[in-house]
Structures are given as C-alpha cells and as structure tokens.
Image (cartoon, rainbow, N blue to C red):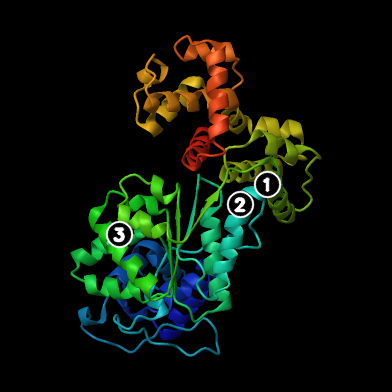
C-alpha cells in the first residue's frame, strides 16, 4: 500500500468524521505499513491508540478495503514497540498543507488532548434563549469571549435536557474559533475518571498530571459522576487547584448544585462554589415554542415541500413539558413520519404519531410521589410525614409537601388533608401559607423548593 493510497483514505475520513475529529485523532497517526491483512499505525501514547482503535478502526478498515487493500485488522502501537520506525506517511487533508510527523508522546501538542467529540450542532447560534436560561447563556458567552477570567469556575447545573451540554459545546466551539492557539479540553467526568484509572494502571500518572495541568481551559461535563470515587476526587481536586492557581478557566456542569451532590468531598464543593454557580431552570411555554420553531425551520429545509399546519407547534409546546430532548425528539419523529407517508403535518397527524409521548407527558403527579420525594430530601420517614409528630424537623418537611400537593396537583384541600393522615383542610391551608411566607425570607428553604420542584416535574 502506498502513501498516496493512505492519503486518499485520510481525505475521505476527514469528510466522514469532521475536521476537528480528524485533526485530533487521525492526523497524529503514522502509517507503518500493511501486511498479512494487518494495517499498522504508530501513535503518540498507549491511551491515544486505545481510543482510536475503539472509535475509528472500523472506519479506517472500511475505507482501506474500499480502496482495494485487504485489511482485516488495525494495530496501533507507540514507536518504541515497532520493529521498524519508518518516516511518517499519513497524508494531509489539503493539497497545500505539508505532511506532518506525529509529535513525541511527552510533547503535549493539541493532538495529545483527545477530549470528547464536540457536536457541531451545539453552538450559540442554535441555542434558543429564554427567561429560564438567559443567565446561563450570558455567563457562557462571557467565558467564550476568552478575555480575562472574571469568574472561575463557571458551574452550570440543571435537570436533563435543559441545555447544559449544549452550552458547554458552544463555549468550546467559540473559544476554538476566536483563539485557536488555546488548549481547550472538554470531556465528561467519566472520561476523566477512565483516564486517571488507566494512568494508574499503566504507571503513567505523571503524564496524566502533566496533560491536565497544561490546558488553558478545562471543561468537565456531569461532574456528579465522580462523587464517591475517592481517588478520582483527590486527583480532580489537585488538578482543579493547579489550574485555578495558574488563572486558567474551568467550566463544570452537573445535574444539581455543588452543595447538593451527595458523596462529593466538602473541599471540592467549596472550591466549585467559589465561582459563578448558575441554574438552568425548567423550560417555560415561550422557550419550548421557540425551540420548536427553530427546529421546524431546519426540518422544512431538509424535507422540502413538507407543510406543517398552524397550531401544531403550539400544541406540542403546551403538551410536552418534560425536557428539550423529548420535545426535539417528538418533532424529529413527526417530520420523518409525515415525509414517509407523504402527508401534511396536521394536528390530527401529530396526535396519532406521537400518542405514546403525549400519554407519557400527561402522567399526573400524585400526592404520594410528592410525600416520598420530600421525605427523601429531608431524610425523614414517610410514616412520620403523615403521622402525628410535630417536631420541627418533621413539621417543616410536611408543610413543604402540603405546599407542593396544592401547587402541583388538582386535588382539593380536603382530599390533600386526607392523604396527610386525615388532617383538616384548614391545617393544609396553614401549612401552604407558612411555606409561602418563609420562601421569601429563608434562602435555604427557597433553594430546597427549587430543587424539589425540578425533581417532581422531571
């Protein structure tokens, strides 16, 4: 197999997986030969080779065979492991760009920062801004401008499908566009943990430390997954401190506020709370409609000639209130179905096509679910919630549950009273009013109510 043939494979691969993925994962490869059905490549590090093997070997083998070269397996080894050490033969993706040798493993170039793949769809232009997420969007924009660090870390939190990951990707995209010289590393907490464990196993912990302490911007998604992992938390804490001390920007996301992440070390919680902590609230009707309108415009261009009746988007925005992913998934299914059957998207078609999603969205919240969730939050027994005890540590959670039962269900006060151990409706009214009074002056109670509301409506 010739260098020219590998060049053709590289050009096709760049188009297939995207320029960013190509530069991060394929360009550093050094083609070392093809014999006995085995394509051999030299890679900067063992971790790099493992990652490419898992994620891109099928693509490479498929393109090699399509180009007429019988390749059944790909091997990825560091240079010291190869019997011969040929000159780099991987091809550039542009004719005017010279071929470039992979850098040694300890020279921490951008290609040695293989983070999670960025989704090209998740940019600031495609992010629909509304009241529930405007502060998070503004904070993300500020970080993406790449100026002096004004708040560090930026901590974004909220429920599933509210836009945390979208904003994380948008920040990374914008930073790379504005300041391509910056070393931006975006990855999930699980990937951080995986790399740490592998570094321990391979006795390359100093390489791991050097890698993570050399970035300009570190972005970690879903940080709640390191909770309870003592060794990983220890390393994350030291990495966090080292970057903060160097005035490097850190952006973190989680499904809840730092202080609410169970089994996360107090010193890490404290560090995370030193920056700007921003909550992405559940979507409101206006924001859901805006998201649907943007998505529908995209699909109109994809499915040319496919019409959508007035009122369909408004109907979906009213009925599907769980999260943005469910909302977008419903619209995707609707356009695909209408295209396949060759029909206009009407309200009747939407009701038929999305019957299961609409039924799930119609699920009614019960008083029992509220009582259970509140009892879990305040760490009291469910029996005490509905029992006669009047201790403060039980009475206040009970009033919180009464408040949500009144706010989030259609049950009458007498019905709610019966579910709380046969209490009179005036007791329920008193409990609700007490919480409404306290929530304006008690910040901890207000935070508890916000968190519980998100969990109950998720």
Q: Quadrant of residue 65?
A: bottom left
Say if 30 sits above or below 117 in the image: below
User: Which of labels 2 and 3 is toward the front?
Assistant: 2
| Element at label 1 | helix
Quarter that holds the N terminus = bottom left
Q: Position of residue 233 (x, y in %)?
A: 28, 57
Say if 106 sits above or below 133 in the image: below
Q: Position of residue 126 (x, y in %)?
A: 65, 59
> Is residue 37 at all visible to an observer of this figure?
no
Q: Position of residue 29 (x, y in %)?
A: 37, 78
Q: Is residue 247 left or right of residue 203?
A: right
| Element at label 3 | helix
Residue on which disc 3 sits: 194
Task: Tell me if label 1 and label 2 are in contact, CB under 8 Å.
Answer: yes
Sequence-wise, the earlier of marks 2 and 3 is 2
Q: Is residue 100 left or right of residue 332?
A: left
Q: Quadrant of residue 320?
A: top right
Which sits in the foreground, 152 or 179?
152
Task: Tell me if label 2 and label 3 are in contact, CB under 8 Å.
Answer: no
Residue on which disc 2 sits: 133
| Element at label 2 | helix
Sequence-wise, the earlier of marks 1 and 2 is 2
Q: Give the residue at x 42% y 23%.
A: 395
Sequence-wise, the earlier of marks 1 and 3 is 3
> Is residue 142 at all visible to an observer of this figure?
yes
* Number of numbered discs: 3
Marks 1/2: CA–CA distance: 9 Å
């Amino acid at each position: 197999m010739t260098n020219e043939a590998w060049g053709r494979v590289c050009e096709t691969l760049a188009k297939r997986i995207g320029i960013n993925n190509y530069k991060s994962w394929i360009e550093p490869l050094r083609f070392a030969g093809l014999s006995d059905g085995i394509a051999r490549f030299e890679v900067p590090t063992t971790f790099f080779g493992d990652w490419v093997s898992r994620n891109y070997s099928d693509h490479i083998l498929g393109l090699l065979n399509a180009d007429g070269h019988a390749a059944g397996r790909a091997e990825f080894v560091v240079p010291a492991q190869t019997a011969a050490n040929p000159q780099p033969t991987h091809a550039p993706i542009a004719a005017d760009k010279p071929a470039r040798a992979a850098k040694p493993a300890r020279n921490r170039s951008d290609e040695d920062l293989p983070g999670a793949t960025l989704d090209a769809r998740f940019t600031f232009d495609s992010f629909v801004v509304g009241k529930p997420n405007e502060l998070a969007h503004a904070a993300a924009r500020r970080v993406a401008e790449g100026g002096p660090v004004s708040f560090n870390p930026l901590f974004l939190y909220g429920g599933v499908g509210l836009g945390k990951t979208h904003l994380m990707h948008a920040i990374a995209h914008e930073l790379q566009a504005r300041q391509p010289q910056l070393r931006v590393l975006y990855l999930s907490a699980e990937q951080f943990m995986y790399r740490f464990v592998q570094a321990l196993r391979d006795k390359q912990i100093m390489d791991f430390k050097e890698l993570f302490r050399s970035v300009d911007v570190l972005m970690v998604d879903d940080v709640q997954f390191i909770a309870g992992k003592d060794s990983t938390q220890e390393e994350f804490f030291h990495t966090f401190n080292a970057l903060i001390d160097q005035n490097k920007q850190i952006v973190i996301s989680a499904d809840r506020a730092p202080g609410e992440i169970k089994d996360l070390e107090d010193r890490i919680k404290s560090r995370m709370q030193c920056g700007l902590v921003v909550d992405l609230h559940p979507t409101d009707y206006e924001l859901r409609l805006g998201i649907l309108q943007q998505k529908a415009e995209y699909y109109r261009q994809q499915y040319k000639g496919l019409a959508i009746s007035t009122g369909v988007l408004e109907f979906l925005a009213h009925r599907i209130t769980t999260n943005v992913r469910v909302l977008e998934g419903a619209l995707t299914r609707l356009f695909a179905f209408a295209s396949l059957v060759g029909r206009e998207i009407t309200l009747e078609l939407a009701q038929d096509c999305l019957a299961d999603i609409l039924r799930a969205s119609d699920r009614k919240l019960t008083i029992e679910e509220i009582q259970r969730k509140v009892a879990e939050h305040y760490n009291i027994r469910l029996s005490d919630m509905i029992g006669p005890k009047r201790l403060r540590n039980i009475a206040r959670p009970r009033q919180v549950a009464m408040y949500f039962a009144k706010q989030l269900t259609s049950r009458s006060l007498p019905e709610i009273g019966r579910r709380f151990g046969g209490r009179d409706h005036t007791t329920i009214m008193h409990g609700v009013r007490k919480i409404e009074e306290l929530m304006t002056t008690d910040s901890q109670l207000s935070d508890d109510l916000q968190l519980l509301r998100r969990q109950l409506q998720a």
